[in-house]
Image: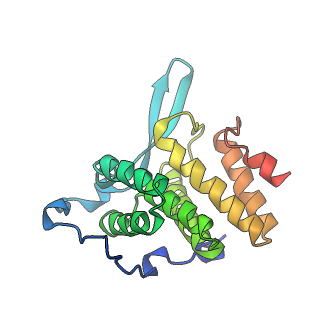
Amino acid sequence: MHDSDFETDPKSESVPLSANAQPKPAGRLPKPHSDPKKDRLRVEKRQSPAGVTWEFIHPRCARKRREDMEEVEEMVAAGEALIAREELVWLLSECPDFLEAHVHLGLIALEADDTKLARGHFGRAYELALRAIEAAGSPQPLPYALDGNKSFFEAAKGLVHCLLLSDRKMMAKDIGRRVAMLDSTDPLGIARMLA
């Protein structure tokens, strides 16, 4: 499977600023890091009473933007999807491995009936996560119940949904199988979508 199979380039999305949107002040720009490779999405081992599990460690730039994501969620709830989209695009320009921002952009695109763009954002988040999983040696299990893993599973579910809408059932099933190997409890019902 190649990135281009289910992904458009969401970075190429041009978003005009609305009359209400303000450019981000210079003070909000992140400071450059000495080693950008350390600020990438990765997977680490977690020891719990139930045994060893694995969890995504999101880049520092994503963790620092929790308040921004809360603002985005408030914008969406208030019906301001265009402004929320602008904020998310800005967040991704500063933090390209921000899975949660891709997932929210995918959901906004689905609401606007833009399946191709939604597939691009969900697909980008899914691919970023797969690279991190493969870099860690394809560890298992990677349970949805751990907070760091939720956006990966949400991206996978969104991607499967978009692929089914695009009549790409075999590709959707491949993703479903891969996700089921990481968390067999299927908390988001991806297997039911594929039945």
**Quadrant in the picture for the N terminus:** bottom right
Location of residue 20 in the rendering, given as x and y in whole percent from the top left corner: 31, 70
View extreme (top): residue? 49
Along the viewing direction, whichever of 9 and 51 lies nearer the viewer: 9
Asked whether the viewer can see residue 63, the reply is no
Snapshot colouring: rainbow
Q: Is residue 99 left or right of residue 113?
A: left
Location of residue 123 in the rendering, given as x and y in whole percent from the top left corner: 58, 65
Asked whether the viewer can see residue 98, the reply is yes
Instruction: Give the residue at x 52% y 58%.
Output: 103
View extreme (right): residue? 195
Counting the numbered discs, the total is 0
Instruction: Give the residue at x 48% y 59%.
Output: 79
View extreme (left): residue? 27
Along the viewing direction, whichever of 37 and 64 lies nearer the viewer: 64
Instruction: Give the residue at x 62% y 66%.
Output: 110
Quadrant position of residue 180: top right
Quadrant position of residue 119: bottom right
Instruction: Give the residue at x 24% y 72%.
Output: 23
Location of residue 63 in the rendering, given as x and y in whole percent from the top left corner: 32, 47
Q: Is residue 91 left or right of residue 142?
A: left
Location of residue 14 in the rendering, given as x and y in whole percent from the top left corner: 42, 82
* Residue 65 higher or lower than 9, as above or below: above
